Structures are given as structure tokens and as C-alpha cells.
Image (spheres, rainbow, N blue to C red):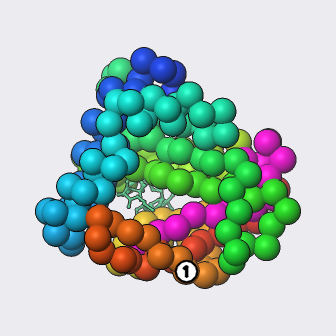
Amino acid sequence: MSGIRRAVASDAPSLAVLAERTFRDAFGARNSPENMDLHCARVFGSDIQQREIDDPGLITTIAEAESHMIGFSQLRLASAHASVAAERPAELKRLYVVAASHGRGVGRDLLQDALDTAAREGCDWLWLGVWEHNPKAMTFYRKFGLEVVGTHAFMLGQDRQRDLIMSVKLG
Ligand SMILES: CC(C)(COP(=O)(O)OP(=O)(O)OC[C@H]1O[C@@H](n2cnc3c(N)ncnc32)[C@H](O)[C@@H]1OP(=O)(O)O)[C@@H](O)C(=O)NCCC(=O)NCCS
């Protein structure tokens, strides 16, 4: 069986492992081990993902196949960005699928759910930050109508990077 569902408290340890693994797979080759380690230590860990799952303003969604986690998304309601002229903006904070499952519609299902959920919650725009050196993800997001509207800085360890801000109007 495969599908998506909301995360529950007991998912925290597995989610922490999945989140770190997919982040390292996506960006490890293009960043120093030191900066990757600093960043991963700051944002991944059972306790950290536990707090995220418990956060009522952050909707964490798990994709699984045969009871194994293969991807996840995190949607932050009521999160504004200066480049996004929205009354009720929502931010897609994370969207990651394990490499072995890329190209099979998992990311599509997670993103479509995030768009539907944000609209259902009364949000008028969805936005996200994507590393400027991640053209694959940008191509993926453009398929869903997201367009580049600005930039912001993102600290990966001690490396100041540039994210592009992409957004789409909901509804
Ligand atoms: C970006 C990501 C989430 C896409 O998930 P995915 O499960 O591989 O994508 P899907 O199979 O659902 O593809 C959905 C659509 O996007 C297209 N697509 C996906 N990846 C693509 C790519 N690299 N280039 C071009 N099109 C792509 C698919 O062809 C498909 O189009 P279709 O519906 O017309 O057939 C996934 O590749 C990923 O986790 N990447 C690493 C982490 C990352 O970069 N996350 C984003 C951080 S901002």
C-alpha cells in the first residue's frame, strides 16, 4: 500500500532519519561536510521533529509505501514573506522524497496535498524557498504553477546561500 497521511507523534524518530537522509542526498555533494554537519545537527533529530509534529501551525505529512516512509512535506500556515503579496500566506517549508522513489508521483501527491490543504485552511498564496542551485526542484514546482518572485538568504552551516522564492495563488 502507498499513500500519504498526517504525521503522528510516534513518527518523530523515523522522520528525523528520513529528513536528514533526504537532505544529505539532495545537497551533500555540493556543500562541505562541515556545513552539512552543522546544519543537520541544528535542524534534525527525534526531539526536533517531535516538536515539529506537535506544532499546530505546522502540518507534517508523510508519504509511505509498504509501511516505509518514502517522503514528507511540512506546510507552515500563516507564514509571510516580503516578496509574496498575500493576505493569508502559507509556506511549504520542506518537501523531500527518497531518491529511489523519485519520478513516481510521490512529490506530486505531497505538493498537491499541500496546495489543497493550504486552500482549505483559507490561505490565498503558497510560497517556498528553493536553493538557486536546485533547478530540478524548480522545474518540478513550475509544473504546479509556482513562479519565482524574490530571493532570501539561507544559512547552511556557515555558508550564506541564496534561495529563490517561488509562489502560486491558491483557489
Ligand atoms: C523535487 C522532488 C520533491 C520531486 O518529487 P518526485 O516524486 O520525484 O516528482 P514526481 O514524480 O511527483 O513528478 C511530478 C511531476 O514533476 C516532474 N518532475 C519531477 N522531477 C523533475 C525533474 N527533475 N525535471 C523535470 N521534471 C520533473 C515529473 O515529470 C512530473 O511531471 P508530469 O506530472 O508531467 O509527469 C524530488 O525530486 C526530491 O525530493 N528532490 C530532492 C529534494 C528537493 O530538492 N526538495 C525540494 C527542496 S526545495
Which quadrant of the figure contains the C terminus?
Answer: bottom right
Pick the residue in front: 56 or 74.
56
Q: Which residue is mark 1?
A: 151
What residue lies at 68% left-to-right and 56% top-to-bottom? 79
Q: Residue 43 at what x, y percent from top left?
A: 37, 48
Q: Is residue 136 left or right of residue 116?
A: left
Give the image quarter of residue 85.
bottom right
At 30% from the left and 57% from the top, the residue drawn is 39
- What residue lies at 67% left-to-right and 69% top-to-bottom? 81
**Left or right placement of residue 2 versus residue 90 in this view:** left
| Drawn side of residue 86 relative to residue 35, left or right | right
Magenta region:
118-131
Q: Looking at the picture, how far across and down is residue 30, in whole percent?
A: 21, 72
Q: Is residue 125 magenta?
A: yes
Ligand 1 within 8 Å, label 1 CB: no
Task: Give the x, y percent position of residue 121.
Answer: 79, 42
Where's the N terminus, which quadrant?
Answer: top left
Q: Does the image show residue 98?
A: no
For the point 55% across and 80% down, the residue is 151
Task: Identify which residue, 112 or 82, lies in the foreground.
Answer: 82
- Residue 89: tell me if it is visible: yes
Q: Amino acid at mark 1?
A: Thr
